[in-house]
Image (tube, rainbow, N blue to C red):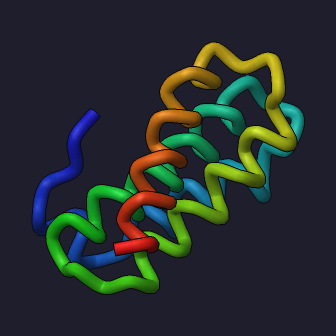
Amino acid sequence: MNFTKEEIQGDSLVHHFNKIIDLYPNSYLVESAYFYKGFYYLQKYGITGDVADIKSARLLFIEFLGKYSNTVFKGLVKEYLKTCNATLTI
């Protein structure tokens, strides 16, 4: 899933991900919403270059792995986390 530049500039997606997480905490959708929220910030950093975005992505991926240790996204999230860490050490 890739977000458009317009979607990333607005932060409206984060609002919707938060809504799913808050309103349906026991839903199967929460895991995906949490993952895509981190991925959103990773992509947003690619457009904005704002270090706060990559830090947000990193934090969300760390929290995600703590919450969902048996997730199907585990390998992918670990790779994204490596990307975040490498970017922050440059």
Quadrant of the rendered image containing residue 56: bottom right
**Residue 71, quarter of picture:** top right
- 48 lies above or below 12: below
Q: Quadrant of residue 48?
A: bottom left
> For the C terminus, which image quadrant?
bottom left
State the image coordinates of residue 4 (x, y, percent, origin top left). 13, 55
Q: Residue at x 22, y 41 (%)?
A: 2
Residue 26, image x, y percentages: 88, 34
Q: Position of residue 63 (x, y in %)?
A: 77, 53
Give coordinates of residue 78: x percent, y percent. 57, 35
Above or below, 25 against 46 in this view is: above
* Foreground of the two, 88 or 38: 88
Task: Tell me if 21 is positioned left or right of 88 in this view.
Answer: right
Q: Is residue 56 above or below residue 31?
A: below
Residue at point 15% right, 70% down?
A: 47
Q: Is residue 26 left or right of residue 4?
A: right
